[in-house]
């Protein structure tokens, strides 16, 4: 219950901050408080809902080095939070060099499919943990759990992937307990699609059995269905949304209510997007979901950096620059971000925004 109260307070705080930042002149706008870094375009799995094109030209471009990440974090506010994801980050042989480069500057999180979690790598990851939430270092590890063993392997299209993930998750939690650490928080994550929607309760119970701190259900997000036509509702486009069409919203709500009713508090049930109500989260499943009652937090709060250093605002807008060529400040205060802010302040959200995980509720605060 305490974790849930803190989580709600945090997202309420973000709602206020996002609202206030909209009215700050660009010269007073703080640098991004959240930076997401895609470390690669490679993965050992081929999850059905994954939007990454592993065969694209991007997968062969030169990756940002640990030294370049070190220079990046030195430009960020000390309060910033970074997330490292992929692809599968643990495929990178220099992953821990990257963590060494940022650990004393920011709090950071890390998302993995868990297939490469060995005892040695778990101990190394735990060594980056801060003593408390205010300390710098690795505060959270997100590990994908897409359902029961059979469903998980079907979704990842790799037999035995669930077993490796389960073994790695239990190893990490066992060692954290032995080392008497509270951090990093272990966050099991499920992407909701038609195949695993009927089995949320089973997946949650499995996560609870592991001893995970959080079980997070995220809505499916088809990046490839985004277009530069901001007036096109991409959920009605030619994207991959048929994989969620079979979800029964009423049955899903019953499962969620059942979990919440019996939840002892050991493993918190959370939802992504985070900044919206439960009803709004369920309404996400409707193809006619209208984002006009929401706000976009992206150009005031966050920066997304591709494996080769390109800064992504949103696929509906152009790249804002490359951290190898420009400073974070110059990119953040540049024309691409500023044009995006002006446009969103004027019209709110666009049909193309439907389904984006960065929407926050636009209710009066």
Image (cartoon, helix red, strand yellow):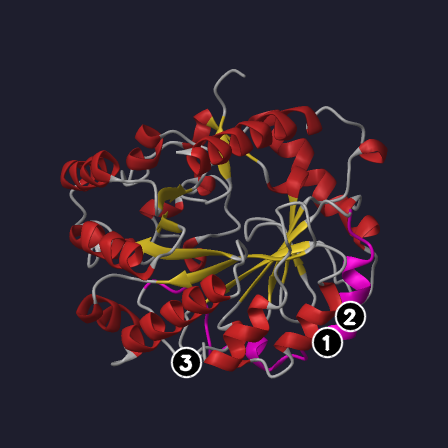
The residue under label 3 is 44
The residue under label 1 is 65
Instruction: Tell me residue 281's x, y (percent).
Output: 34, 36
Q: In the rendered view, does 320 fall on the left or right side of 167?
A: right
Marks 1 and 3 sit apart, C-alpha to C-alpha, by 21 Å
In the image, residue 90 sits, relative to residue 261, either above or below, namely below
Total numbered labels: 3
User: In the structure shown, which secondary structural element does the residue marked by tag 3 occupy?
Assistant: loop
The residue under label 2 is 68
Specify whether residue 118 is in view.
yes
Marks 1 and 2 sit apart, C-alpha to C-alpha, by 5 Å
Is 73 in the magenta?
yes
Considering the image in quadrants, where does the N terminus appear? top left
Q: Nearer the viewer, residue 52 or 210?
A: 210
User: In the structure shown, which secondary structural element does the residue marked by tag 2 occupy?
Assistant: helix
Instruction: Tell me residue 232's x, y (percent).
Output: 43, 43
Q: Find the residue positioned furthest to the top.
A: 364
Q: In the rendered view, does 112 fall on the left or right side of 72?
A: left
């Amino acid at each position: 219950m305490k974790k849930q109260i803190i989580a709600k307070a945090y997202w309420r705080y973000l709602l206020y901050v996002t609202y206030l930042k909209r009215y700050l002149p660009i010269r007073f706008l703080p640098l991004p408080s959240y930076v997401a870094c895609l470390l690669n375009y490679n993965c050992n799995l081929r999850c059905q809902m994954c939007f990454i094109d592993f065969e694209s030209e991007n997968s062969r471009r030169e990756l940002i080095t640990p030294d370049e990440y070190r220079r990046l974090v030195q430009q960020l506010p000390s309060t910033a939070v970074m997330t490292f994801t992929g692809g599968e980050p643990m495929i990178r042989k220099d992953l821990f060099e990257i963590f060494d480069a940022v650990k004393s500057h920011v709090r950071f999180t890390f998302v993995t499919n868990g297939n490469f979690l060995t005892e040695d790598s778990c101990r190394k990851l735990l060594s980056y943990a801060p003593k408390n939430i205010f300390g710098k270092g690795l505060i959270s590890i997100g590990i994908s759990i897409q359902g029961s063993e059979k469903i998980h392997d079907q979704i990842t299209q790799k037999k035995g992937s669930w077993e490796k993930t389960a073994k790695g998750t239990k190893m990490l939690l066992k060692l954290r307990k032995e080392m008497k650490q509270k951090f990093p928080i272990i966050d099991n994550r499920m992407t909701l699609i038609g195949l695993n929607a009927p089995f949320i309760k089973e997946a949650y119970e499995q996560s609870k059995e592991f001893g995970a701190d959080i079980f997070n259900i995220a809505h499916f997000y088809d990046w490839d269905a985004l277009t530069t036509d901001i007036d096109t509702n991409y959920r009605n486009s030619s994207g991959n949304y048929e994989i969620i069409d079979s979800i029964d919203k009423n049955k899903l709500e019953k499962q969620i209510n059942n979990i919440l009713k019996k939840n002892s508090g050991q493993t918190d049930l959370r939802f992504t997007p985070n900044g919206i109500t439960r009803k709004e989260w369920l309404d996400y499943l409707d193809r006619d979901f209208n984002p006009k009652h929401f706000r976009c937090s992206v150009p005031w709060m966050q920066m997304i950096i591709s494996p080769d250093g390109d800064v992504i605002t949103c696929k509906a807008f152009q790249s804002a620059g490359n951290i190898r060529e420009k400073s974070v400040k110059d990119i953040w205060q540049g024309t691409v971000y500023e044009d995006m802010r002006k446009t969103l302040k004027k019209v709110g959200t666009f049909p193309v925004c439907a389904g984006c995980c960065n929407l926050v509720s636009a209710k009066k605060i």
